[in-house]
Amino acid sequence: MAEKKSILLRLSPKMWEDISRWADDEFRSVNGQIEYLISDALRKRSKSGNNKSRDDSPDSEAEDNLE
């Protein structure tokens, strides 16, 4: 398994509070909740067939950064 990447993410105080409460409800850290939400969105995108081939996508470099 590849080492996880670190990113800087700026959130509004309101968004931080909302995610923090949601994370508490699901017994996760804020970081864990954000990682779960991104993973869930990527799974849904993959299942919907809404993702283009990496070779065809102008955003393929940005998608590579999510892995």
Image: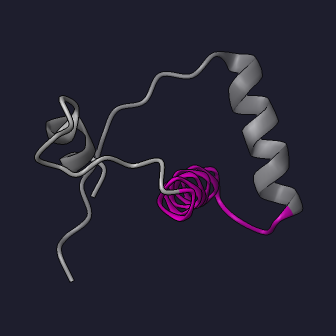
Q: How many numbered tags mark residues here?
A: 0
Q: Position of residue 26 (x, y in %)?
A: 82, 65
Q: How is the image coloured?
A: one colour
Q: Main secondary structure of the magenta part?
A: helix
Residue extent of the magenta highlight: 26-48
Residue 29, compared with residue 55, is above or below; it is below
Q: Residue at image x 14%, y 38%?
A: 61
Q: Position of residue 17 (x, y in %)?
A: 78, 31
Quadrant of residue 57 within the rendered picture: top left
The reply to whether the magenta stretch includes residue 27 is: yes
Q: Residue at image x 61%, y 53%?
A: 37
Q: Compare residues 12 and 65 and report the one nearer the observer.
A: 65
**Quadrant of the frame with the N terminus:** bottom left
Q: Compare residues 13 and 55 and report the one nearer the observer.
A: 55
**Quadrant of the frame with the C terminus:** bottom left
Q: Residue at image x 58%, y 49%?
A: 34
Q: Where is residue 59 in the image (x, y as percent from the top left)?
A: 22, 32
Q: Is residue 45 left or right of residue 67?
A: right
Residue 28, compared with residue 45, is above or below; it is below
Q: In this view, does 12 lie to the left or right of 7?
A: right
